[in-house]
Amino acid sequence: MSNYDIVIIGGGPAGLAAAIYGARARLKTIIINKGTIGGMAHTTREIVNYPGYGQTSGPKLMADFKKHAENFGAQFLKDEVVEVDFSQEEKVIKTKKGKEFTAKAVILGCGTQPRLLNISGETKLRGSGVAYCATCDAEFFEGEDVVVIGSGDQAIEEGLYITKFARKVTVVVLHDEGILDCNKLSAEIAFNNEKMKFIWNSTIEEVLGASNVESVKIKNIKTGKSTELVCQGVFFFVGMIPATGFLQNSGVNMDQKGYIPVNELMETNLEGIYGVGDNRVKYLRQVVSAAGDGATAAVAAERYIEELNNFRETVVENEQPVILLFFNPIIEESLALNTVLEKVVSENGYNYKIIRVDISRKKMLAERYGVQEAPSAIVLNKGVIIKKLDCVIDEGKISSQLRK
């Protein structure tokens, strides 16, 4: 078993940025990534909106990210995470190749994957004419006829790229004529591209072919009429789904689509677990926003790990008995108990160190010691519970409990 400070699951721009920040903070950091480093960004031929680069390619930008992380000492492993255990302070990560890791903090940057229509022929002919990445596969359709399904930014921009190779690109669109879901500039360029044609109010019913794509069956959603269009390639761009299936029983909260809700620190509902990039609930899914997510999560993880180490030093390894006071800042009684405890310990010269724990932030620590509400106070000796205090706001009663 290999021990790390931070394990990052996913090597897209969010994960890479997190690795840069984590490794630079002198934390032992590793990225576990099952595919090509860079994720979906690696499949983007042209990037023109990443600050400071002007115009670059996805592979070039992601290679720069990776080199930057490596220069600070981040490690990389090509493998797939298949099982996790986030129930303890030391998180456990298991991979498809049988490797096992522990981490103080885990950053989830596993990204998204193409949504399947699951129509007849789609799975059977995947890799034999059915494709989901223009940058990866467009060159294989030199001089041939290609069908693109979708009308968002990805579909239209990838379709435009395919026109550099294909003889003709036919875009099948669900909407009325002239209506696309992409940005206006891409739509204008697409409408003016002689190689790009559109079939409106339609969807794909079936991909046809014995061993390779030979045609598609297209259905008009208004008339119900089906027609067959000869082609040699079909590119599906009908949206993405988060690659979070392996988290199903992990305890990490996810929405109905599988995206991970986080707060402004990229924290999930579990302590020490962070969600970044395209697999989290967010407004903008771009390289620049993913990089920001990764930086934020790594800095938050660094501080979380500092707190863990500090707790171990001040509580678990401390020769002096410790009073753990679990409080909630919005509960007045919590604050009052803190005042009473400090006064009793100080005035009576009791040999106790008081450590305050915000129960709203440190849920895992509260669970470890069986604390369910605030205020609560327990006395520990080297991390082991000696007694639980009756948390009454009464100096005499608190003092008598501490004398025993």
Image (cartoon, rainbow, N blue to C red):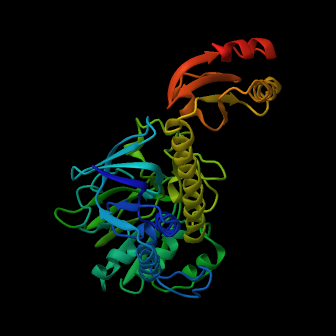
Tell me residue 3's x, y (percent). Answer: 35, 52
Tell me residue 199's x, y (percent). Answer: 48, 67
Q: Is residue 222 visible?
A: no
Q: Quadrant of residue 246?
A: top left
Does residue 339 sit above or below 66 in this rendering?
A: above
Tell me residue 213's x, y (percent). Answer: 25, 67
Does residue 255 sit above or below 211 in this rendering?
A: above
Tell me residue 346's x, y (percent). Answer: 77, 30
Does residue 38 sit above or below 7 in this rendering?
A: below
Residue extending farthest to the left is 211
| Label total for image | 0
**356 left or right of 363 in image:** right
**157 left or right of 144 in image:** right
Give whichever of 86, 281 is nearer the camera: 86
Q: Report the residue at 58% width, 61% height from top.
A: 293
Q: Report the residue at 57% width, 83% height from top.
A: 48
Q: Is residue 386 visible?
A: yes
Give whichever of 39, 151 is nearer the camera: 39
Residue extending farthest to the front is 349
Q: Quadrant of residue 299?
A: bottom right
Give whichever of 212, 32 is nearer the camera: 32
**207 left or right of 177 in image:** left
Q: Report the residue at 41% width, 38% height from top.
A: 248
Q: Quadrant of the C terminus?
A: top right
